[in-house]
Amino acid sequence: MRVRAGYPPSLTTAGKESDVTPVICILTTTTPLPLHCCCAPFQGDIVAASPNFSHMLPHVFSEPDRYDPARYLPPREEDKTKPFSFIGFGGGRHACIGQNFAYLQIKSIWSVMLREFEFEMLDPVPEPDYDSMVIGPKPARVRYTRRKLAA
């Protein structure tokens, strides 16, 4: 993502911030080589990472509970302060190949929705619903009104 310093958050950063609670709660892989660090798994061990947990680490993301798309913009770029800080689409050599397409879809849909409608939350921002493998928000009501576009 290339954004000049001082620019307001974009749909890309808003989408990335919204992915702090990804739809998949655990990523797993098999270690191809022994890792040389504390608590290192052996070659062939299965390791797991939780994006939901790692995206809420206060030593990586300042105020992780606060919605702040600017955290991904220069000069802060909190997602780049430590390796694999942001793993919403996986990480490393085998990150999700659909990530760019997903952001394209998000930006396309939201740009039309935000151009055509005004939105108002009627309920508090919903908590994530962890009752299924695919995580989504708990129900919440949103009022939307079609904008009067200039001809």
Image: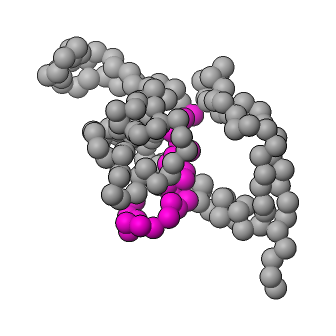
- Rendered location of residue 20, percent (x, y): 51, 39
Point out residue 67 in the picture as x, y percentages from the top left corner: 55, 44
Q: Residue furthest front?
A: 63
Total labels drawn:
0
The residue nearer to you, when weighing 58 against 101, is: 58
- Residue 96 location, x and y as percent? 43, 43
**Magenta highlight: main SS:** loop
Q: Nearer the viewer, residue 49 or 7?
A: 7
Quarter of the image for the N terminus: give it: bottom left
In which quarter of the view is residue 108 placed? bottom right
Image quadrant where residue 118 sits: bottom right
Colouring convention used in this rendered image of the protein:
one colour
**Residue 7 position (above or below residue 47):** below
Eyeballing the image, is 14 above or below 48? Answer: below
Which residue is pictured at 59% across the width and 56% down the height? 105
| Residue 40 appears left or right of 30 | left
Seen at 85% across and 60% down, the residue is 145
Image side of residue 30 versus residue 63, left or right? left
Residue 32 position, x and y percent, is 23, 25
Looking at the image, which residue is at 49% across and 29% down? 52
Q: Quadrant of residue 51?
A: top left
Q: Is residue 123 left or right of residue 64?
A: right
**Residue 103: in sight, yes or no?**
no
- From this viewpoint, is residue 44 visible? yes
Q: Is residue 7 magenta?
A: yes
Quarter of the image with the C terminus is bottom right
Query: Magenta includes 86?
Result: no
Up the image or down, 147 lies above or below 51; here it is below
Q: Residue at x 45, y 26 (%)?
A: 53
The stretch in magenta equals: 1-23
Nearer-the-camera pick, 22 or 119? 119
Q: As drawn, which residue projects farthest toward the bottom?
A: 151
